[in-house]
Amino acid sequence: MKSETKTAQTLFRSDAMQRLMAFSALIVLSIGFSVASPYFRTFDNFVGILLATAVNGVLALGVTFVIITAGIDLSVGTVLTFSAVLTGVFITNWHLPIPLGILGGVLAGSLAGFVNGTLISRMKIPPFIATLGMLYATKGLSLVISELKPIYFNDTPAFREMAMGSILGKIIPGFEVPNAVFILFGAAIIANFILTRTVLGRYTFALGSNEEATRLSGVNVAAWKTAVYTLCGFFAGIGGVLMASRLNSAQPALGAGYELDAIAAVVIGGTSLSGGEGSILGTIIGAFIISTLTNGLRILSVPQEWQMVVTGGIVILAVFLDILRRRR
Amino acid sequence: MTLPNTSSENHEVLLRMEGVYKSFPGVQALSDARFELRYGEVHALVGENGAGKSTLMKILGGIYHMDAGQVYLEGRAVEIHSPRMAQDLGISIIHQELNLMPHLTIAQNIFIGREPRSKISFLMDDKTTNQQAENLFKLLNLQLDPTTKVSDLTVAKQQMVEIAKALSYNAKILVMDEPTAALTDTEIEELFSVIRQLREKGVGIVHISHRLEELKQISDRVTVMRDGKYIDTLQTQAAPINQIISLMVGRIIYESAPELPENPSQEVVLEVRNLNSGKLLKDVSFSLKRGEILGFAGLMGAGRTEVARAIFGADPYDSGEIYVKGQRVHIKSPGDAVSQGVGYLSEDRKRYGLALGMDVKENVAMAAMKKFLSWLGWVDFKRTAARGQEMVKALNIKTPSLEQKVKFLSGGNQQKVVVGKWLTADTDILIFDEPTRGIDVGAKSEIYKLLNDLAHQGKAIIMISSELPEVLRMSHRVVVMCEGRVTGVLNASEATQESIMKFATMRGSVVQASA
Ligand SMILES: Nc1ncnc2c1ncn2[C@@H]1O[C@H](COP(=O)(O)OP(=O)(O)OP(=O)(O)O)[C@@H](O)[C@H]1O
Ligand SMILES: [Mg+2]
């Protein structure tokens, strides 16, 4: 890097460059798979990738906020399950109207996030531990509430339509892109707006950058931190409802491990685990990199075990490149 | 907010703190501390490192809660529970440690917690934020771009941001805990003119500083603290510095006359040739002899720290040659530097000098861990503790025990721990970057004596300092830098405040000075 001029270096080190790099990686990956397999580049497969990204992407949105505050949320995967199961209970068992059931599921996720935030900010329990506890608790609760059985939404076909139907397909026949994809994009736009334009977003960065300084500036650190974890739970709740709608059932045993995919997406997207930096666009690109990779490798008949190994390598490579970028 | 229009004649009391007690585990930080502040007064608060100055002001700022005591604001008893409450009461504090959010911009930092909102109340209005910051800088005569990220600023600029932030609260009481420690003389002068304006407006200002010569320039009264106790309050103009010092230390100390160590040998131990690094350093060359103290003077941002960091392997450089004892060396990391016999005491001890969460003895041993390993490879705690004890004694470090985490020490004592660490590493070449920043008079003369002793023992020392009297008093030769270039090298006999300032402001021109 010695011969580079100062301005080139500044550009190279900028956050925009990070996103550009991640985006280029996504493009290169897609081109590579397209060349390797004609099936990869079909419209159906493209839609498949989009759909596969929806749940993980929504989860990762919330996790982005938490990681920018230099925290971590390990519970999003099982909170997602918890929300899905409760949505099932509300709609199928209690016969509540669908919108109310969805609202209930999302609120359940937010509540779990609120409890996380309270444990962390008021009781000073380290985020890793607090959310690990929540991981186990929600996993157990989901099994208890569902009595270990999946809850199906067979009586309410409209619920499945929510994620799997295609409004776009009705407008432009042939473009049957499921609504789930648009829900992801909608959620991402809202998340981006919150992160960049609202006070909550500003404090998210401030907390991760220097919590003590934020506190000394008179900001109610505990309240805002709680808000960040609640927001994370909120997105996990949306993820849960999406998942249930997609599978037409709430699967109490599914969800554990999703938190790792979400964290991986956030990290690949350039959000720093040490806090203070990150972006929604990066996270979305990160989520797409993961699902493109999984999809492409599967088409090339790479066994699932090896897909994981590759994903692991990509996460580490992404972070390493980011470190290189920051080094001057 | 309206304040009574007062002159310094008006003796109305704005703030009174009485009988304040505060203890931390193992330390009685304050016992019967007192403080009084009037409208339109600059009140200096002085005392040795660890006397309790910062603690007293943190109580005022709602950061610590006192064990006992009373605080009266404009005659009313108040209890201050949080920083937010302090702000709402019109108390604004610039803390000794920089308290900024490095990932945010300057404007975002200044308005954190009260950012201008747009019509929809939860949305921020960044345009107005930047505009208000801009106006503030104009008022304070500062050259800052509100949209710059704070992490891209030098320590001095960051300090100016802190000051601007504190002033932007329109506070009735402004507390400045060693605001000048990182500033150059011109910057201090600018700060003082701002302080004088505020005083005119009736703001009460608390000024904590170890630069006693400043007191006469700026303060009306001075309160002395020692060991957490109130000692006395004096009219600054009527109080001789010596009297203040003896009140601070509780004994009379004689400022030893500036004594220059013996002439160094002619053996060159460090030679730097044509060091270049981006825009920061341009063709920096100099040499350092055994037993010599080489002063580095210059304005903030002249590139002195950058030279030190390049030599120490903390930052890469573009081109140039470095010779240690005649051998060309390629120092790529601080580890390399230590094994080549180069030690560096950073100017920013919190960030680069200390492991804040570790205790005193561990910090002392850190740069020379090898010396404390037993033959099987584990750390010999007895030896570590013995060395720690030795340094605590030699440097007079005020700590309840060797096991105290350094983050709980007062600023000055933290600095002494850093010095202890590098004395333990025992490198032949030592680079001290602002070694006396934030250190009290007693400790300062101890550090001077120490530098002298080290030079006598044959160590070669580079001392970067922004305090000209210190540079003049301590150095055999002075290297003056300006905008990344060496603009002059002066012998002790030629060096004066005037000659140094001349070279330090020699922008854009390279001058061959006598070596
Ligand atoms: N949070 C804390 N925990 C434990 N001890 C502390 C804490 N803060 C301060 N102390 C101790 O209280 C005493 C007073 O410290 P304080 O920082 O108020 O000193 P000071 O007068 O500001 O010194 P300096 O000039 O070095 O900044 C010191 O002995 C210090 O070690
Ligand atoms: Mg202090």
Image: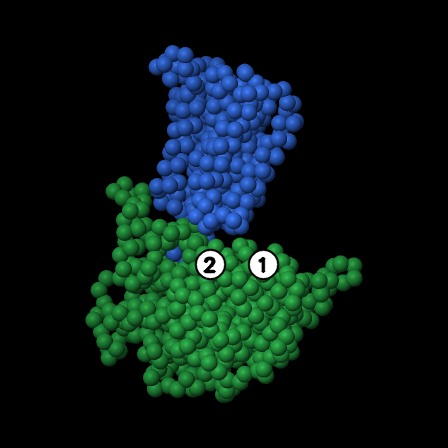
Chain colours: A blue, B green
Q: Are marks 2 and 1 in contact (CB under 8 Å)?
A: no
Q: Which residue is drawn at 55% across and 41% down?
A: A321
Q: Mark 1 points at which residue?
A: B313
Q: Are there few (<14), some (14-19), or many (20+) residues within 10 Å of tag 1?
A: many
Instruction: Give the number of the disc on residue B280.
Output: 2
Tell me where residue B268 sits by quadrant: bottom right
- Mark 2 lies on a secondary structure that is loop
Image coordinates of residue B337 in percent, x first then y, are: 62, 61
Q: Mark 1 near ligand 1 (CB under 8 Å)?
A: no
Image coordinates of residue B429 in percent, x first then y, are: 61, 69
Q: Residue at x 34, y 86 (%)?
A: B238
Mark 2, mark 1: which one is toward the viewer? 2
Ranked by sequence position, the earlier of labels 2 and 1 is 2
Instruction: Mark yes or no: residue A200 visible.
Output: yes
Image coordinates of residue A190 in percent, x first then y, are: 38, 34
Answer with left or right where residue B37 lies relative to residue A6: left
Instruction: Mark yes or no: residue B181 visible.
Output: no
For mark 1, name the chain. B
Residue type highlighted by circle 2: Leu
